[in-house]
């Protein structure tokens, strides 16, 4: 007999294990089909079904269910249910790149159910989403205050503590502290594995720990973690976690870099993670140019070094045609549609791999057409920090500004 409550719980339990994605999708959808007995559907199993759909990259479907659940709970004046539904929808907004909407839902959830009334087992989940939202909205200091908030003893027994550890790792990454970031991501992984959660779609802790280890020069750990992430993401089969894992693989390993980047670009083109997609395109453009220049040097032999390279002087800052402030955030194209970009001059693209993680993230957002203020908000830094990072990017890549940066992206997309 069909039992929607059991289906919702099973969808989440199977989803965190990271196998049989189609079965998880089927179970999650079954959680919303009324039982033959006519009994009203329970809220928590349906929330678990929605979270399972987030793992399968079916976010739009989950959002529709969450909206219906919210209307139902409002009619019944069930404040606790409303708060939980809004919090899950905030996670959806974060995954879809809508931090403003996430902030609104979290504020509404807190109005329905103040923090001092939250169950300790649920508190780490709320705090983690709050930290990520604040970081994406530029409220770094508030995120630090949340990270330092003491937890009640029972909260340490919650599986959602892993999400709080992950958020602390993201905060350390934002603060350019790779040692702390790696430790937090490792702790997040230990907590998830302890609770049987293997699926990288829940939290990509392995990829981010690998990138932190790579920054610290620990290539052995970086390679081990990222290869495991790719294997698990491929087994699960959703585009977003697989594309992110393929991108991290290309970042931390030299072998087959171009092939790995091409795979990441192809995978992420079908995923909602647009910033990761743009970063992958820029990395691919640089890697392909580096490979072509290496082949040319080998073909020319000693003649290739007869003349010194011409390094163009740094040019003035080229302002971007950014989207107007206040436009609702959402997926952005890697190149502004209808805009012709100047072709980037030939330069030694090998230095792309000498950029820091924060420089690469800043360059990816600039290539999407965001202005400095918008980039500062996305990365939770000051506008001056963005200017300094972009100046470093232009200097290291030996380009003159955003037009040439976008030309790299355009060139890679056309290749």
Image: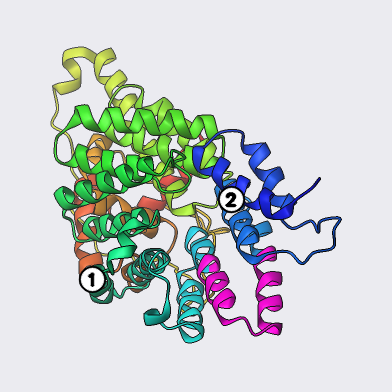
What's drawn in magenta, residue-wise? 64-89
Q: Which mark is residue 150?
A: 1
Colour basis: rainbow
Q: Is residue 144 above or below residue 110?
A: above
Separation of marks 1 and 2 at Cα, in angstroms: 29 Å
Q: Give neighbour class at mark 1: few <14, some 14-19, many 20+ (Cα, 10 Å).
A: few
- Where residue 92 sits: x, y (%)? 54, 62
Q: Is residue 310 above or below residue 129?
A: above
Indicate whether residue 66 is drawn in magenta: yes
- Where residue 397 sits: x, y (%)? 24, 45
Residue 14 occupies which quadrant of the picture?
A: top right
Q: Residue at x 29, y 56 (%)?
A: 165
Q: Residue at x 56, y 35 (%)?
A: 237
Residue 176 occupies which quadrant of the picture?
A: bottom left
| Main SS of residues in magenta | helix
Judged left or right of residue 324, residue 218 is: left
Nearest to the eye among marks 1 and 2: give it: 1
Q: Which mark is residue 260?
A: none
Name the foreground residue: 140 vs 78.
78
- Where residue 26 sits: x, y (%)? 71, 43
- Residue 414 in sight from this viewpoint: no
Question: Where is mark 2, residue-wise?
Answer: 52
SS at badge 1 = loop
Q: Residue at x 43, y 38 (%)?
A: 198
């Amino acid at each position: 007999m069909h039992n929607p409550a059991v289906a919702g719980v099973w969808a989440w339990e199977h989803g965190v294990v990271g196998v049989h994605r189609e079965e998880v999708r089927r179970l999650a959808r079954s959680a919303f089909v009324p039982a033959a007995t006519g009994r009203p559907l329970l809220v928590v199993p349906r929330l678990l079904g929605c979270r399972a759909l987030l793992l399968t990259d079916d976010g739009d479907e989950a959002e529709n269910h969450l909206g219906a659940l919210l209307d139902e709970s409002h009619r019944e004046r069930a404040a606790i249910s409303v708060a939980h539904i809004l919090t899950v929808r905030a996670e959806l907004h974060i995954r879809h790149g809508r931090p403003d909407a996430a902030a609104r839902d979290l504020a509404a959830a807190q109005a329905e159910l103040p923090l001092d009334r939250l169950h300790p087992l649920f508190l780490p989940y709320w705090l983690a989403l709050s930290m990520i939202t604040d970081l994406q909205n530029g409220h770094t200091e508030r995120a630090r205050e949340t990270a330092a908030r003491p937890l009640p003893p029972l909260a340490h027994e919650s599986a959602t503590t892993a999400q709080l550890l992950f958020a602390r790792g993201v905060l350390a990454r934002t603060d350019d502290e790779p040692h702390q970031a790696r430790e937090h991501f490792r702790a997040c992984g230990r907590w998830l594995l302890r609770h049987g959660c293997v699926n990288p779609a829940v939290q990509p802790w392995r990829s981010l720990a690998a990138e932190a280890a790579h920054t610290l020069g620990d290539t052995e750990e970086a390679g081990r973690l990222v290869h495991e992430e790719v294997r698990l993401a491929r087994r699960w089969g959703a585009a977003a976690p697989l594309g992110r894992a393929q991108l991290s693989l290309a970042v931390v390993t030299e072998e087959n870099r171009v092939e790995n980047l091409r795979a990441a670009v192809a995978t992420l083109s079908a995923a909602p993670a647009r910033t990761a997609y743009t970063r992958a395109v820029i990395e691919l453009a640089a890697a392909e140019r580096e490979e072509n220049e290496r082949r040319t040097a080998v073909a020319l032999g000693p003649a290739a070094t007869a003349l010194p390279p011409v390094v163009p002087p740094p040019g003035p800052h080229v302002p971007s045609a950014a989207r107007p402030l206040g436009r609702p955030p959402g997926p952005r194209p890697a190149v502004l549609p209808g805009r012709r970009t100047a072709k980037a001059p030939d330069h030694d693209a090998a230095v792309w791999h000498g950029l820091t993680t924060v420089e690469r993230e800043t360059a990816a957002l600039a290539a999407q057409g965001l202005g400095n203020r918008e980039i500062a908000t996305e990365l939770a830094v000051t506008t001056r920090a963005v200017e300094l990072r972009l100046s470093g990017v232009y200097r290291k890549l030996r380009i003159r500004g955003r037009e040439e940066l976008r030309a790299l992206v355009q060139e890679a997309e056309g290749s």
